[in-house]
Amino acid sequence: MNPVTRQPHLPPQRLPGLDHLRALAIALVFFFHYQIPLFGHPDWIPAYAAFGWTGVDLFFVLSGFLVSSHLFDQLNRGQPIRWKAYATKRFFRIVPAYVLVTAVYFMVPQFREKEALPPLWKFLTFTQNLGLNLRELGTFSHAWSLCVEVHFYLLLPLLVGLVAHRRRTYWLYWAILLLFAGGFFLRQYNWTTFYLPARGTDNEYITWYQYVYYPTYNRLDGVLVGVFIAGITSFSPISWARLTPYGNWLLLFGLLALTGAYFVCEDSLSYMASMAGFPLVAIGYGLLVLSALLPSGTLYNLPSRLTSFVARISYAVYLTHKGVIHVTQALLSKLSVDTTSNMTLLLCICSCVLVATALNMLIEQPVIEWAKNRITSRPKRLAA
Protein backbone atom coordinates (compact mmCIF):
# COMPACT_ATOMS: atom_id res chain seq x y z
CA MET A 1 0.00 0.00 0.00
CA ASN A 2 1.19 3.45 -0.96
CA PRO A 3 4.90 2.79 -1.38
CA VAL A 4 7.16 5.83 -1.58
CA THR A 5 6.87 6.99 -5.17
CA ARG A 6 8.28 9.74 -7.31
CA GLN A 7 6.62 13.07 -6.67
CA PRO A 8 4.23 14.70 -9.12
CA HIS A 9 5.55 17.58 -11.13
CA LEU A 10 6.02 20.87 -9.35
CA PRO A 11 7.74 23.82 -11.02
CA PRO A 12 11.32 24.39 -9.87
CA GLN A 13 11.09 28.18 -9.67
CA ARG A 14 10.09 30.16 -6.62
CA LEU A 15 6.32 30.10 -6.41
CA PRO A 16 4.75 33.59 -6.27
CA GLY A 17 1.62 32.23 -4.59
CA LEU A 18 3.64 31.25 -1.53
CA ASP A 19 5.19 34.72 -1.45
CA HIS A 20 1.69 36.22 -1.44
CA LEU A 21 0.77 34.07 1.54
CA ARG A 22 3.98 34.82 3.42
CA ALA A 23 3.35 38.54 2.89
CA LEU A 24 -0.22 38.08 4.11
CA ALA A 25 1.03 36.27 7.22
CA ILE A 26 3.39 39.04 8.29
CA ALA A 27 0.78 41.72 7.55
CA LEU A 28 -1.73 39.92 9.78
CA VAL A 29 0.81 39.61 12.59
CA PHE A 30 1.92 43.24 12.30
CA PHE A 31 -1.59 44.72 12.49
CA PHE A 32 -2.64 42.36 15.27
CA HIS A 33 0.27 43.49 17.42
CA TYR A 34 -0.17 47.14 16.42
CA GLN A 35 -3.63 47.24 18.00
CA ILE A 36 -2.62 45.86 21.41
CA PRO A 37 -2.76 48.31 24.36
CA LEU A 38 1.03 48.74 24.38
CA PHE A 39 0.89 50.94 21.29
CA GLY A 40 -1.13 53.90 20.13
CA HIS A 41 -3.28 53.06 17.13
CA PRO A 42 -6.10 54.51 15.04
CA ASP A 43 -9.60 53.65 16.22
CA TRP A 44 -10.37 51.68 13.07
CA ILE A 45 -7.60 49.07 13.47
CA PRO A 46 -9.03 46.75 16.18
CA ALA A 47 -12.13 46.03 14.07
CA TYR A 48 -9.92 44.71 11.24
CA ALA A 49 -6.95 43.29 13.15
CA ALA A 50 -8.68 40.98 15.64
CA PHE A 51 -8.07 37.89 13.48
CA GLY A 52 -4.43 38.81 12.87
CA TRP A 53 -3.19 36.33 15.47
CA THR A 54 -3.74 33.63 12.83
CA GLY A 55 -0.81 34.97 10.82
CA VAL A 56 1.54 32.74 12.82
CA ASP A 57 -0.60 29.73 11.91
CA LEU A 58 -0.15 30.59 8.23
CA PHE A 59 3.61 30.74 8.85
CA PHE A 60 3.37 27.31 10.50
CA VAL A 61 1.58 25.79 7.49
CA LEU A 62 4.10 27.31 5.07
CA SER A 63 7.04 26.12 7.14
CA GLY A 64 5.61 22.64 7.56
CA PHE A 65 5.15 22.33 3.81
CA LEU A 66 8.40 23.87 2.62
CA VAL A 67 10.78 22.22 5.05
CA SER A 68 9.27 18.73 4.84
CA SER A 69 8.96 18.86 1.05
CA HIS A 70 12.76 19.17 0.77
CA LEU A 71 13.25 16.01 2.79
CA PHE A 72 10.49 14.13 0.98
CA ASP A 73 12.12 15.13 -2.30
CA GLN A 74 15.32 13.37 -1.21
CA LEU A 75 13.34 10.24 -0.39
CA ASN A 76 11.71 10.32 -3.81
CA ARG A 77 15.09 10.55 -5.48
CA GLY A 78 16.28 7.52 -3.55
CA GLN A 79 18.91 9.60 -1.78
CA PRO A 80 19.88 9.27 1.86
CA ILE A 81 18.62 12.17 3.94
CA ARG A 82 21.42 14.65 4.52
CA TRP A 83 20.65 15.40 8.14
CA LYS A 84 23.76 17.53 8.63
CA ALA A 85 22.77 19.72 5.70
CA TYR A 86 19.20 19.88 7.02
CA ALA A 87 20.32 20.97 10.50
CA THR A 88 22.86 23.44 9.10
CA LYS A 89 20.34 25.09 6.82
CA ARG A 90 17.71 25.37 9.54
CA PHE A 91 20.26 26.74 12.02
CA PHE A 92 21.60 29.48 9.76
CA ARG A 93 18.12 30.39 8.50
CA ILE A 94 16.75 30.99 12.00
CA VAL A 95 19.44 31.51 14.62
CA PRO A 96 21.82 34.36 13.59
CA ALA A 97 19.15 37.04 13.13
CA TYR A 98 17.26 35.75 16.17
CA VAL A 99 20.34 35.88 18.40
CA LEU A 100 21.13 39.42 17.23
CA VAL A 101 17.62 40.68 18.00
CA THR A 102 17.64 38.86 21.35
CA ALA A 103 20.93 40.56 22.19
CA VAL A 104 19.40 43.95 21.36
CA TYR A 105 16.46 43.21 23.67
CA PHE A 106 18.78 42.34 26.55
CA MET A 107 21.40 45.04 25.97
CA VAL A 108 19.19 47.98 24.94
CA PRO A 109 16.31 48.42 27.42
CA GLN A 110 14.87 51.28 25.32
CA PHE A 111 14.05 48.73 22.60
CA ARG A 112 11.75 46.71 24.86
CA GLU A 113 8.03 47.13 24.30
CA LYS A 114 7.46 45.98 27.92
CA GLU A 115 9.50 46.00 31.11
CA ALA A 116 10.49 42.44 31.97
CA LEU A 117 12.15 39.73 29.89
CA PRO A 118 12.13 35.99 30.52
CA PRO A 119 15.55 34.56 31.44
CA LEU A 120 18.10 34.54 28.62
CA TRP A 121 18.47 30.76 28.80
CA LYS A 122 14.83 30.32 27.81
CA PHE A 123 15.44 32.25 24.60
CA LEU A 124 18.68 30.43 23.83
CA THR A 125 17.11 26.99 24.41
CA PHE A 126 13.88 27.87 22.56
CA THR A 127 11.77 27.03 25.60
CA GLN A 128 10.41 30.54 26.16
CA ASN A 129 6.92 29.48 25.06
CA LEU A 130 6.61 26.88 27.83
CA GLY A 131 5.09 28.38 30.98
CA LEU A 132 5.25 31.92 29.57
CA ASN A 133 3.50 34.45 31.83
CA LEU A 134 2.41 37.20 29.47
CA ARG A 135 1.81 39.74 32.22
CA GLU A 136 5.09 39.40 34.11
CA LEU A 137 7.48 38.32 31.34
CA GLY A 138 5.75 39.46 28.16
CA THR A 139 8.62 41.31 26.47
CA PHE A 140 9.57 39.76 23.10
CA SER A 141 6.69 37.35 23.70
CA HIS A 142 6.17 36.86 19.97
CA ALA A 143 9.31 34.71 19.90
CA TRP A 144 7.08 31.89 21.18
CA SER A 145 6.31 30.89 17.59
CA LEU A 146 10.02 30.39 16.84
CA CYS A 147 10.10 27.90 19.70
CA VAL A 148 7.26 25.99 18.02
CA GLU A 149 9.16 26.08 14.71
CA VAL A 150 12.35 24.74 16.29
CA HIS A 151 10.47 21.99 18.09
CA PHE A 152 8.91 21.08 14.75
CA TYR A 153 12.37 20.89 13.17
CA LEU A 154 13.28 18.35 15.85
CA LEU A 155 10.07 16.36 15.32
CA LEU A 156 10.19 16.25 11.53
CA PRO A 157 13.15 13.83 11.25
CA LEU A 158 11.10 11.29 13.21
CA LEU A 159 8.24 11.57 10.72
CA VAL A 160 10.59 11.35 7.75
CA GLY A 161 12.41 8.44 9.34
CA LEU A 162 9.08 6.66 9.77
CA VAL A 163 8.39 6.92 6.04
CA ALA A 164 11.94 5.96 5.08
CA HIS A 165 12.01 2.95 7.39
CA ARG A 166 8.57 1.57 6.56
CA ARG A 167 8.67 2.56 2.87
CA ARG A 168 4.92 3.16 3.13
CA THR A 169 3.56 6.69 3.09
CA TYR A 170 0.39 5.80 4.98
CA TRP A 171 2.56 5.67 8.14
CA LEU A 172 3.16 9.38 7.65
CA TYR A 173 -0.54 10.17 7.38
CA TRP A 174 -1.39 8.04 10.42
CA ALA A 175 1.32 9.79 12.43
CA ILE A 176 -0.02 13.20 11.40
CA LEU A 177 -3.56 12.15 12.31
CA LEU A 178 -2.46 10.90 15.74
CA LEU A 179 -0.50 14.08 16.47
CA PHE A 180 -3.43 16.16 15.27
CA ALA A 181 -5.79 14.27 17.58
CA GLY A 182 -3.26 14.55 20.40
CA GLY A 183 -3.53 18.33 20.16
CA PHE A 184 -7.25 18.11 20.89
CA PHE A 185 -6.73 15.98 24.00
CA LEU A 186 -3.90 18.15 25.33
CA ARG A 187 -5.85 21.36 24.81
CA GLN A 188 -8.85 19.73 26.48
CA TYR A 189 -6.71 18.75 29.48
CA ASN A 190 -5.04 22.16 29.81
CA TRP A 191 -8.28 24.08 29.29
CA THR A 192 -10.02 22.03 31.97
CA THR A 193 -7.14 21.67 34.44
CA PHE A 194 -5.57 25.12 34.31
CA TYR A 195 -7.86 27.58 32.57
CA LEU A 196 -11.24 26.72 34.12
CA PRO A 197 -10.07 27.27 37.73
CA ALA A 198 -8.77 30.71 36.68
CA ARG A 199 -11.97 31.72 34.90
CA GLY A 200 -13.46 34.90 36.29
CA THR A 201 -10.20 35.90 38.02
CA ASP A 202 -7.63 38.53 37.10
CA ASN A 203 -5.43 35.74 35.73
CA GLU A 204 -8.01 34.32 33.30
CA TYR A 205 -6.54 35.79 30.12
CA ILE A 206 -2.94 35.18 31.18
CA THR A 207 -3.66 31.55 32.12
CA TRP A 208 -5.30 30.83 28.76
CA TYR A 209 -2.25 32.10 26.90
CA GLN A 210 0.15 30.28 29.22
CA TYR A 211 -1.48 26.85 29.09
CA VAL A 212 -3.58 26.78 25.91
CA TYR A 213 -2.14 29.20 23.33
CA TYR A 214 1.64 29.15 23.70
CA PRO A 215 2.73 25.52 24.37
CA THR A 216 4.09 23.67 21.36
CA TYR A 217 2.08 20.52 21.99
CA ASN A 218 -1.13 22.57 21.62
CA ARG A 219 -0.05 24.41 18.45
CA LEU A 220 1.21 21.76 16.01
CA ASP A 221 -1.95 21.90 13.87
CA GLY A 222 -0.45 24.28 11.30
CA VAL A 223 2.85 22.50 10.75
CA LEU A 224 1.07 19.14 10.57
CA VAL A 225 -1.24 20.45 7.85
CA GLY A 226 1.85 21.69 6.01
CA VAL A 227 3.54 18.29 6.28
CA PHE A 228 0.33 16.63 5.06
CA ILE A 229 0.32 18.88 1.97
CA ALA A 230 3.98 18.03 1.34
CA GLY A 231 3.05 14.35 1.60
CA ILE A 232 0.37 14.76 -1.06
CA THR A 233 2.60 16.72 -3.45
CA SER A 234 5.48 14.30 -2.95
CA PHE A 235 3.95 10.85 -2.62
CA SER A 236 0.43 10.95 -4.07
CA PRO A 237 0.58 11.81 -7.79
CA ILE A 238 -2.96 10.56 -8.42
CA SER A 239 -4.44 12.74 -5.68
CA TRP A 240 -2.35 15.68 -6.86
CA ALA A 241 -3.56 15.24 -10.44
CA ARG A 242 -7.16 15.23 -9.25
CA LEU A 243 -6.63 18.47 -7.34
CA THR A 244 -4.84 20.27 -10.17
CA PRO A 245 -7.92 21.81 -11.90
CA TYR A 246 -9.39 23.14 -8.66
CA GLY A 247 -6.95 25.84 -7.58
CA ASN A 248 -9.54 28.59 -7.26
CA TRP A 249 -12.10 26.27 -5.64
CA LEU A 250 -9.55 25.42 -2.97
CA LEU A 251 -8.94 29.14 -2.47
CA LEU A 252 -12.68 29.68 -2.02
CA PHE A 253 -13.06 26.77 0.41
CA GLY A 254 -10.04 28.03 2.36
CA LEU A 255 -11.56 31.49 2.69
CA LEU A 256 -14.86 29.95 3.80
CA ALA A 257 -13.06 27.85 6.41
CA LEU A 258 -11.25 30.92 7.70
CA THR A 259 -14.51 32.86 7.80
CA GLY A 260 -15.98 30.09 9.93
CA ALA A 261 -12.86 30.15 12.12
CA TYR A 262 -13.27 33.90 12.59
CA PHE A 263 -16.70 33.40 14.16
CA VAL A 264 -15.64 30.30 16.10
CA CYS A 265 -12.75 32.25 17.61
CA GLU A 266 -14.66 35.46 18.25
CA ASP A 267 -14.41 34.65 21.95
CA SER A 268 -10.88 33.26 21.97
CA LEU A 269 -11.16 31.97 25.55
CA SER A 270 -14.23 29.86 24.84
CA TYR A 271 -14.15 26.08 24.80
CA MET A 272 -15.09 25.89 21.12
CA ALA A 273 -12.38 28.34 20.09
CA SER A 274 -9.74 26.55 22.16
CA MET A 275 -10.64 23.10 20.84
CA ALA A 276 -11.72 23.67 17.23
CA GLY A 277 -10.31 27.12 16.42
CA PHE A 278 -6.67 26.19 15.89
CA PRO A 279 -7.28 23.16 13.62
CA LEU A 280 -9.94 25.03 11.61
CA VAL A 281 -7.54 27.93 11.05
CA ALA A 282 -4.78 25.49 10.05
CA ILE A 283 -7.04 23.68 7.57
CA GLY A 284 -8.24 26.98 6.10
CA TYR A 285 -4.70 28.19 5.52
CA GLY A 286 -3.71 24.75 4.26
CA LEU A 287 -6.32 25.07 1.52
CA LEU A 288 -4.86 28.46 0.60
CA VAL A 289 -1.38 26.94 0.38
CA LEU A 290 -2.70 24.14 -1.85
CA SER A 291 -4.35 26.74 -4.06
CA ALA A 292 -1.09 28.69 -4.30
CA LEU A 293 0.70 25.55 -5.54
CA LEU A 294 -1.71 24.81 -8.39
CA PRO A 295 -1.31 26.39 -11.85
CA SER A 296 -5.10 26.62 -12.10
CA GLY A 297 -5.22 28.96 -9.10
CA THR A 298 -5.19 32.74 -9.14
CA LEU A 299 -2.51 32.97 -6.46
CA TYR A 300 -0.15 30.86 -8.58
CA ASN A 301 -0.49 33.12 -11.61
CA LEU A 302 -0.05 36.54 -10.03
CA PRO A 303 3.66 37.33 -9.61
CA SER A 304 4.32 40.49 -7.61
CA ARG A 305 7.60 42.17 -6.78
CA LEU A 306 5.98 43.79 -3.77
CA THR A 307 4.84 40.56 -2.11
CA SER A 308 8.13 38.90 -3.08
CA PHE A 309 9.99 41.68 -1.27
CA VAL A 310 7.71 41.55 1.77
CA ALA A 311 8.06 37.76 1.87
CA ARG A 312 11.84 38.07 1.79
CA ILE A 313 11.96 40.40 4.80
CA SER A 314 9.04 38.80 6.66
CA TYR A 315 11.20 36.94 9.18
CA ALA A 316 13.17 40.09 9.99
CA VAL A 317 9.93 42.07 10.35
CA TYR A 318 8.56 39.41 12.65
CA LEU A 319 11.61 39.51 14.90
CA THR A 320 11.88 43.29 15.19
CA HIS A 321 8.46 44.87 14.65
CA LYS A 322 7.34 45.25 18.26
CA GLY A 323 10.58 46.88 19.36
CA VAL A 324 10.70 49.13 16.30
CA ILE A 325 7.07 50.23 16.76
CA HIS A 326 7.83 51.02 20.41
CA VAL A 327 10.93 53.08 19.59
CA THR A 328 9.24 54.87 16.68
CA GLN A 329 6.20 55.85 18.74
CA ALA A 330 8.39 56.95 21.65
CA LEU A 331 10.35 59.27 19.34
CA LEU A 332 7.20 60.63 17.70
CA SER A 333 5.64 61.22 21.11
CA LYS A 334 8.61 63.39 22.08
CA LEU A 335 7.95 65.40 18.94
CA SER A 336 4.31 65.84 20.03
CA VAL A 337 3.04 63.67 17.19
CA ASP A 338 -0.24 61.89 17.91
CA THR A 339 0.66 58.20 18.22
CA THR A 340 -2.94 57.18 17.46
CA SER A 341 -2.90 58.82 14.03
CA ASN A 342 -2.79 57.20 10.61
CA MET A 343 0.42 59.12 9.94
CA THR A 344 2.08 57.40 12.91
CA LEU A 345 0.90 54.03 11.58
CA LEU A 346 2.47 54.81 8.19
CA LEU A 347 5.73 55.92 9.81
CA CYS A 348 5.82 52.76 11.95
CA ILE A 349 5.32 50.60 8.86
CA CYS A 350 8.15 52.43 7.09
CA SER A 351 10.51 52.13 10.05
CA CYS A 352 9.75 48.41 10.44
CA VAL A 353 10.41 47.84 6.73
CA LEU A 354 13.69 49.79 6.87
CA VAL A 355 15.00 47.95 9.93
CA ALA A 356 13.92 44.58 8.56
CA THR A 357 15.51 45.27 5.17
CA ALA A 358 18.78 46.17 6.86
CA LEU A 359 18.68 43.02 9.00
CA ASN A 360 17.88 40.91 5.95
CA MET A 361 20.64 42.41 3.79
CA LEU A 362 23.35 42.60 6.46
CA ILE A 363 22.71 39.39 8.41
CA GLU A 364 20.15 37.01 6.91
CA GLN A 365 21.16 36.90 3.25
CA PRO A 366 24.97 36.86 3.75
CA VAL A 367 24.71 34.12 6.39
CA ILE A 368 22.33 32.04 4.27
CA GLU A 369 24.59 32.34 1.23
CA TRP A 370 27.64 31.47 3.31
CA ALA A 371 25.91 28.38 4.66
CA LYS A 372 24.55 27.39 1.24
CA ASN A 373 28.03 27.46 -0.28
CA ARG A 374 29.18 24.96 2.31
CA ILE A 375 26.32 22.53 1.93
CA THR A 376 27.20 20.16 -0.85
CA SER A 377 23.72 18.98 -1.69
CA ARG A 378 21.64 19.05 -4.82
CA PRO A 379 19.63 22.21 -5.56
CA LYS A 380 16.28 22.22 -3.85
CA ARG A 381 13.10 22.65 -5.87
CA LEU A 382 11.49 25.11 -3.46
CA ALA A 383 12.97 27.94 -1.44
CA ALA A 384 12.38 27.59 2.30
Image (cartoon, helix red, strand yellow):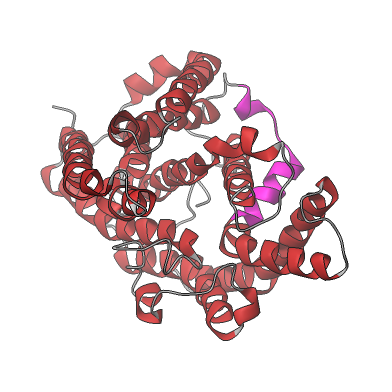
Camera-nearest residue between 51 and 16: 51
Task: Report the predominant secondary structure element of the magenta stretch.
Answer: helix
Does residue 216 appear anywhere in the picture?
A: yes
**Quadrant in the rendering for residue 189:** top left
Camera-nearest residue between 332 and 164: 332
Q: Is 289 inside the magenta-drawn segment?
A: no
Q: Is 313 inside the magenta-drawn segment?
A: yes
Q: Position of residue 346 (x, y in %)?
A: 81, 50
Q: Residue at x 75, y 53 (%)?
A: 349
Quadrant of the drawing holding the N terminus: top left
Report the side of 45 relative to 379 (left or right). Answer: right
- The span picked out in magenta is 298-314
Q: Residue at x 71, y 69 (%)?
A: 327
Q: How many marks?
A: 0
Looking at the image, the residue that sits furthest to the bottom is: 107
**Quadrant in the rendering for residue 110:** bottom right
Camera-nearest residue between 355 and 298: 355
Q: Position of residue 159 (x, y in %)?
A: 22, 48
Camera-nearest residue between 334 and 64: 334
Q: Is residue 91 above or below residue 165?
A: below
Report the side of 370 relative to 214 (left or right). Answer: right
